[in-house]
Image: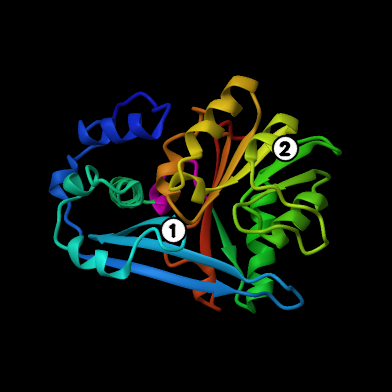
Amino acid sequence: MSHSQPYSLAGLQQKVLAGHYGLPPEEFATTSAFWLHHTTRLSGSQVTYRNHYLLLRSGDAFGACSFEAGELTPDLCADLSGHSLDSLLRHPSAVVRIAALDAYLAQVLPHREAEGATPVRLPHGTPEVRAQARDRAVAELLAVPAGAKVALIGVVNPLVAAIRDRGGVPLPCDFNLRSTQWGEPVTDDMRHVLAEADAVVATGMTLGNGTFDHILDHCRGKELPLVVYAQSGSSVARAFLGAGVTALSAEPFPFSQFSAEETVLYRYRADPR
């Protein structure tokens, strides 16, 4: 599997369609499609997280992409099952294209088999215990000096706390939250936090909402560390390790919030130490 790294999502799509990552995508079919909406409110919090995902199953892999409320309707799923990943990579919806990319890349190289992937076992327990363990695992990928400003694009309160515990100063940005659990303001304009940041932590949800390429370009141009934590598009984000992404917490489906049992996420560094 010899290929140069992509520098944009469109570039990655073109490389996959051209067969640069192994078997051509027309050889993989989508057997199932899921429209998923779930909400979470952790104990002691006044924040209800509302998440929507499109999931595509192809063979023994799932591809995932998040989307905003109202962007896709459940009946879309009836039009996605049975199609080749090649055709879904050309779909007019960016969300469908990212989910198809994720499903393809997860099949040709599963996280469990990837060189450089370090499994992290999240413990059995309550949602609070598991969320804290997950977000500590993400924050541990940060290698910044005390007092460094960390743009957090995609806010979950346990991750805000975990960045603080690492000595970072979180600069929170989110489309849907207006303040953190501790009353800190949350901007919805990532340009403000990127301009101040010494490092960036970004959710995989940026892959589906059109902001990922901008974050990637900014971090490359400023030579900033970029840590991505991804349930959505975890295999897509992995393709950019060393091409702007410096570290990744990849959590393929089924995601940790859907189980109380032990589950596994995979951590990567572009420059392992």
Q: Residue at x 74, y 55 (%)?
A: 160
Q: Residue at x 26, y 36 (%)?
A: 16
Give the percent coordinates (x, y) of residue 163.
76, 50
Give the percent coordinates (x, y) of residue 32.
23, 66
Q: Is residue 15 left or right of residue 186?
A: left
For the N terminus, the quadrant is top left
Label 1 Cα neighbours within 10 Å, binned few <14 / some 14-19 / many ≥20: many
Q: Secondary structure at mark 2?
A: loop
Q: Which mark is residue 47?
A: none
The stretch in magenta equals: 111-118
Looking at the image, the residue that sits furthest to the right is 147
For the C terminus, the quadrant is top right
Q: Upstream in the sequence, badge 2 or badge 1?
A: 2
| Image vertical order of residue 241 relative to residue 228, above or below | above
Q: Which residue is mark 1?
A: 252
Q: Is residue 155 left or right of residue 35?
A: right
| Image vertical order of residue 58 relative to residue 38, above or below | above
| Image vertical order of residue 155 relative to residue 211, above or below | below
Q: Are marks 2 and 1 in contact (CB under 8 Å)?
A: no
Give the percent coordinates (x, y) of residue 264.
51, 62
Q: Secondary structure at mark 1?
A: loop
- Is 116 contained in the magenta span? yes
Looking at the image, the residue that sits furthest to the front is 70
Q: Nearer the viewer, residue 84 or 70?
A: 70
Q: Which residue is mark 2?
A: 143
Q: How many marks?
A: 2
